[in-house]
Image: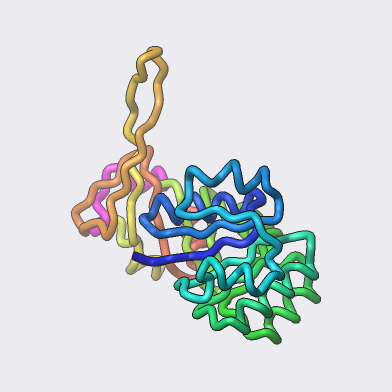
Amino acid sequence: MKQFAIIGLGNFGTAVARELMEQGAQVIAMDRDEERVEAIKEHVTCAVTMEGGDEAALRSVSVHEVDAAVVCIGQNVEANLLITVLLKKIGVKKIWSRAISALQQEILKALDVDSIINLEQDMGCMVARSLMIENVVKHVYLSPGCSVAEMEVPAALVGRTLRQSAIRQDYNLNVVAVKRRIPQINKDGERIFDEVTENVPSPETRLSENDILILVGGDKDIAKFGRQ
């Protein structure tokens, strides 16, 4: 079972810790704020109130043995960098650290962390890309010029199979999943949708009006597909 340390229990850190637990991992959650630690202690493997810059305290909960540590501290740049340095020093295998400024990002690069999390920049790019391309539900950057996009099925393709839609041949895009929104009536008589995802759909999967396509490919090809 994988083990992770989450340092900093703001909204972001708490969400990461809870999701890792949902995925079956063991999680050590740490923050200097006792109220935040109390709020999450029932939802993680171990919750500890401590100053992250305390090397002895980090070792006392075996942070050096986790598969990865995520430094989720945002505004306190000094604490973020100090903890990242200490994690490197005690031999944590993999370190992800949050950055909120260009300078902090450059320092983290110099520290050779495994991944830098820039929530504001990443979310800004995702929103901009989603706005620019027609019919996009969600757009996630992979590498320069390449993305994953969730897109509504164009009206022209409703009722066709994936083979008949020729998305790969005509647009050079791979359909890696299809989300189906199945209408239901809840106990209050309201119309709701249950979402079911078909991963690696077969060529004979038939597309419906409420389906969402998960596409991987070039940004220009995604934009072209969205214009049809």
Position in image of residue 118 (x %, y %): 67, 65
Viewer-proximal residue, 70 or 213? 70
Location of residue 56 with respect to 32 vertically, above or below: below
Q: Residue 141 appears at what percent x and percent y?
A: 55, 66
Identify the magenta region. Answer: 154-164
In the rendered image, the residue lying farthest to the top is: 188
As for residue 156 lying within the magenta part, the answer is: yes
Q: Quadrant of residue 24?
A: bottom left
105 or 60: nearer the eye?
60
Which one is nearer the viewer's eye here, 170 or 30? 30
Residue 168 placement, left or right of 88: left
* Labels in figure, total: 0
Give the residue at x 68% y 66%. 52
Q: Is residue 192 magenta?
A: no
Left or right, 179 with respect to 99, comes to: left
| Residue depicted at x 26% and y 48% | 160
Q: Quadrant of residue 109?
A: bottom right
Vertical position of residue 108 compared to residue 196: above or below: below
